[in-house]
Image: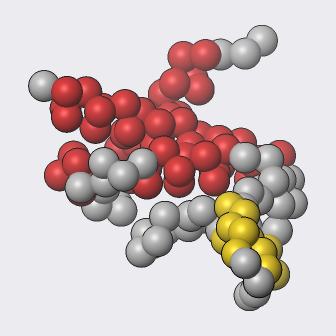
Amino acid sequence: MIDTALVLEQIADERSRQINAEGYSREHDDEHADGAIAMAAACYAAPHRIYIKRDYADGVTFADPWPAGWRGDKRPHEGNVVRSNGSHGEAKRRDLLVKAAALIIAEIERMDRAAK
């Protein structure tokens, strides 16, 4: 049986960790009205790496949409080898989803504060 209360507690614990250990306070979050928090959440939540395709007259590039200048990217990687978010097993995938959920909460809270 799925224990929703336990999952919500884990998400709340992760949000607290983001604030206390990583320094992602309300003030920090309020500086990111550009969608960076939501994009970081999307990067964590996606089952595979996502990329932004940019077409140019002389070619195409694919860029990682992880917010520029953000530290703390916990997605699987080994050197310059990019791995799928599920490449290290279900436990790592679940951990990334909890991180994503906590970031979504941070983005909702940021939007609510901005609307006041």
Q: Residue furthest top?
A: 1
Residue 45 figure quarter: top right
Which image quarter: residue 88? Answer: bottom right
Q: List x then y, in percent, for residue 36.
A: 43, 54
Is residue 54 depicted above or below 5 in this figure? Answer: below
Rendered image coloring scheme? secondary structure
66 sits left or right of 9 in the view: right
Measured from the top left, where is residue 73 in percent x and y? 56, 67
Asked whether residue 17 appears in the rendered view, the answer is no
Q: Residue furthest left?
A: 116
Question: Disc count in the image?
Answer: 0
Quadrant, the N terminus = top right
Quarter residue 111 falls in: top left
Residue 70, visible in the rendered structure: yes
Tell me what residue is drawn at x 17 percent, y 52 percent. 27
Residue drawn at point x = 59 percent, y = 26 percent: 7
What residue appears at the point 63 percent right and 53 percent down from the top-left corner? 43
Residue 44 in the image, given as x and y percentages of width and height: 63, 51
Location of residue 112 in the rendering, given as x and y in whole percent from the top left corner: 25, 27
Q: Nearer the viewer, residue 61 or 20?
A: 61
| Residue farthest to the front, as pictured | 57
* Residue 74 located left or right of residue 110: right
Of 56 and 46, which appears nearest the observer?
56
Question: What's the residue at 61%, 46% (across, down)?
Answer: 42
Q: Image quadrant for the C terminus?
A: top left
